[in-house]
Image (cartoon, helix red, strand yellow):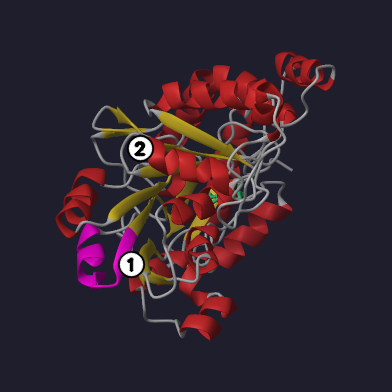
Amino acid sequence: MIPYGRQFIDKDDIDAVVDVLQSDWLTTGPSVGEFEAALAACVNAKEAVAVSSGTAALHAAMYALKIAPGDEVIVPAMTFAATANCVVYQGATPIFVDVDPETLLIRPEAVEAALTPRTRAVIAVDYSGHPADYDRLRAITAQHGIALVADACHALGGSYKERPVGSLADLSTFSFHPVKHIATGEGGMIVTDDPRLAERMRRFRNHGITTDHRQREKQGSWFYEMVDLGYNYRITDLQCALGLSQLKKLPLFLKQRRNIARAYDEAFAASAHIKPLAVAADVDHAYHLYVIRLQSADLAIDRNGLFGILRQNGIGVNVHYIPVHLHPFYRRQFGTGPGLCPAAETAYGQILSIPMFAAMTAAQTREVIDRLKAAVAENRR
Ligand SMILES: *Cc1c(COP(=O)(O)O)cnc(C)c1O
């Protein structure tokens, strides 16, 4: 099976992890700060806080902004559930807004229409690796004095009007799950230019305690205080050493992903049935995913049929995502349901993520294209 995504690990990565295993610090050691500094530099941010997952990163961002019960946070309907869950963790209410039908990115007009006196923040999602429209979102959030957060878990290495993803919002979050651009097993990072927000998140990832174990050892002191309720969201040095090693290969990974995307773009350019998402001229797409929409009006199969055929033929396709407001938890807890975000709901019935990962070979790319085209051609009505 050609998976839709997977990690690429080489000897340098393995050596980096083994070195940490033989060192004094398995967690809260020097690799954490090194990984944070390297990622901050990579995305042109002043501060970075590494945590145990992309989800923990989103939770820390909401905590840093003091999102609390009674607050509303605007999120796009077309995203992974964690984007909205982090709002709920803080006892606040996610307000789902619809996406652009061509890009599946959050629509600034929809954000404007959803603002209320309770709105405290907007979380933009760089769906599939395409940066959201940050200038327009920034204009709205600045005018209303609310925070702009980028769930950039799809977009490490992407850029918008020549500015890197990670420098476009008040806080930006990344994930290092194995299907993402760089892998640490589990892992995440929040970047910001605001040292006070960074300080709050460092405390939050360590139970709400003011100093960590290593700082105390350095100061020769046992004293610490828990000043707020935090979590254990720390990341290990093993993971950070792997992340540092992976980050060195990010330019290569991006190049490979963009090459695959170009081959797909060309292959489907003339297809009446296989429609890639639109890409704006002023962005560098990071291609976490390559998403096509199936136009099945004159076909004997719908998206689910195509999904089944491709899976049977060894092509590991996937669907990203079920719109979050349609999940049973949100329907039950927040009374959401069909009709709330029509563009996201329509897209949900048509989208398919086809294989996209740095280690994919030209032959594998060709096979995906051929199988996809054949499945459509063989199912004309
Ligand atoms: C992967 C992902 C997350 C969560 O990251 P984890 O590291 O798996 O917790 C959040 N939001 C989006 C859009 C993602 O793709």
User: Percent position (x, y) of residue 34?
Assistant: 58, 20
> In the image, residue 233 lies at what x, y percent?
65, 47
Disc 2 residue type (three-letter):
Asp
Q: Is any atom of residue 345 visible in this view? A: yes
* Residue carrying label 2: 194
Q: Is mark 2 within 8 Å of ligand 1?
A: no
Q: Is residue 289 left or right of residue 367?
A: left
Percent x, y for residue 174?
51, 40
Within the magenta stretch, is there residue 110? yes
Q: Is residue 17 left or right of residue 22?
A: left
Q: Nearer the viewer, residue 262 or 104?
A: 104
> Which residues lie in the magenta part?
108-121
Disc 1 crowd, CA 10 A, few/some/many (<14, 14-19, 20+): many
Give the quarter of the image for residue 169. top left
Query: Residue 114: x, y in percent?
Result: 26, 71
Q: Is residue 331 left or right of residue 280?
A: right
- Residue placed most toward the observer, 300 or 368: 368
Q: Amino acid at mark 1?
A: Asp
Report the residue at 41% width, 43% height from top.
197
Q: Which residue is mark 1?
A: 98
Residue 114 on the magenta span: yes
Q: Nearer the viewer, residue 194 or 39?
A: 194
